[in-house]
Image (cartoon, rainbow, N blue to C red):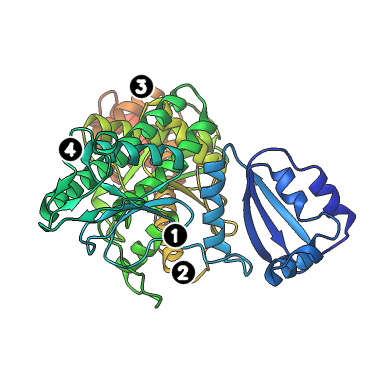
Amino acid sequence: MSDDATLKEKVRRLPDKPGVYLMKDRLGRIIYVGKAKSLKKRVSSYFQRGRARTISQPKIRALIELIADLDTIEVKSEPEALLLEGKLIKQWRPRYNTDFTDDKRFLLVRVDPNEELPRFRLTRIKKDDRSRYFGPFAHSGLLRKTLAQMRRQFGILLGDGTPQQLPSGHWRLYDDVRQELYGAATIVSTDDYRRRVDEACAFLEGKSREWLASLRREMVTSASRQEFEKAAELRDVVFALEKTLAKTRNFTRTDPTRPSGDSDALRELGEALGLSGPPRAMECFDISHISGTFVVASMVHFTAGRPDKDQYRRFSIKSFIGNDDFRAMEEVVGRRYRRLRDESKPFPDLVVIDGGRGQISAALKAFFALDITPPPLIGLAKKAETVIFPDARAPLNLPLNHPALNLLQRLRDEAHRFANTYNADLRSRKIRESVLDDVPGLGPVRRAALLAHFGSIEKIRAANAAQLAEAPGFGPKFAAELSEFFKTSLAAPTPADEA
């Protein structure tokens, strides 16, 4: 273990708050990720004098000897620390962490249909064993109370149940009927009991979704009170529950081979971001301007991984004048999803913002101002192609050849192209219209009349003196002067003008 004074000082200054810590070796590689109720107490325990010699497990002794540096991420609660720990382990795969497969650290409820009398058991490991799994549940105490209530309500067996089979083939579930089952019969047939199990499973699944709905309501309430940190924390828990509930009925082992094609890239993107499924509908926003002028925004829409140009939208900024990407992002995101809400149209599975933390915060502000629960939302920062989350999760850096990242890049680049094209069109149109400002004697009234009569600068340029004289307020003499001005002062439009 390093005796570096800087490391010791870093440990001494740690807060007495929950969080996640990342241990590094001398090469800066992350070798272990852990969570703590108190960062100060937990991390300090690694650096107690002579601790490595008193530990019996060789793996932990080796870890302590290799620690040369550390980083910490402070969070608001233990459940948030648990969620973040799992995401970081899956992201970095440190050598001294045990395998942290999906949902391993949370309590799950397992029901094995192969048992003659299926029991409701608690477990932390989900296996591909044809059992039904419910969860994960970050609050174990609440889960245990719920199961106890379910035992009384439905007359089911928990993991500690000891049923006895009677000579008739029926089962006596509990010894003390009054204490355990109340109004439910304790002597049942196998078929009767399985019907109870089906009802309890339906209740448990519904209870999970009830908790999820409650979390969503609490998140919206926090946001409306401008408690954005609390709202982001609740959002993190909502993500975890949404993902698991979507997988409750179909649990399959993932294929370790590298997939190809849009559908596989979408699946990998959904898994990398912790979504409930592949983001079939995605929308991406980008802001484009030149030194604060000609500020415009674009939104592109991908369906099943491909551009869906009928759903592209472009926006001119209406709420202010000047250079403020954050305000521009807040405006266009609000306009887009206010309209979808008002028209009762579905929101996309994923919203991508071209930018980092500031742009994401601006987008979230738009949703909160409208009292709309945001759909899954990320930013893609160009500098290192880093995925930024709106909640407490650490930024995600996928390998540059990862199909999920490549799909996000295509989406972001298309939004950038579409925004730049609109900006160029607007800029070119304004430049061409400004040509009329240089015509001697042509004031704003006759300039507007000329544009209204011909419809465009190109048609005005192409008109002869007689045609110009037909515009309201133009006599033959001024029309001839205008025609001569265009001939002598203006060249034909270049390809750049028409961009």
Q: Alpha-carbon distance for marks 1 and 2?
A: 10 Å
Kindly indicate whether the residue at mark 2 contacts the one at mark 1 (C-beta within 8 angstroms): yes
Q: Alpha-carbon distance for marks 4 and 3?
A: 88 Å
Residue 98 higher or lower than 488, as above or below: below
**Disc 4 on helix, strand or loop?**
loop
Residue 64 higher or lower than 138, as above or below: below
Q: Is residue 39 visible?
A: yes
Q: Alpha-carbon distance for marks 3 and 2?
A: 58 Å
Q: Which residue is mark 3?
A: 445
Residue 469 higher or lower than 121, as above or below: above
**Disc 3 on helix, strand or loop?**
helix
**Disc 1 on helix, strand or loop?**
helix
Label 1: few (<14), some (14–19) or many (≥20) C-alpha neighbours in 10 Å: some
- Circle nearer the N terminus (1, 2): 1
Q: Residue at x 88, y 58 (%)?
A: 4
Q: Position of residue 392 (x, y in %)?
A: 55, 43
Q: Alpha-carbon distance for marks 4 and 1?
A: 45 Å
Q: Which residue is mark 2?
A: 402
Q: Alpha-carbon distance for marks 1 and 3?
A: 59 Å
**Residue 397 occupies which quadrant of the picture?**
bottom right
Q: Position of residue 173 (x, y in %)?
A: 23, 48
Q: Which residue is mark 4?
A: 184
Label 2: few (<14), some (14–19) or many (≥20) C-alpha neighbours in 10 Å: some
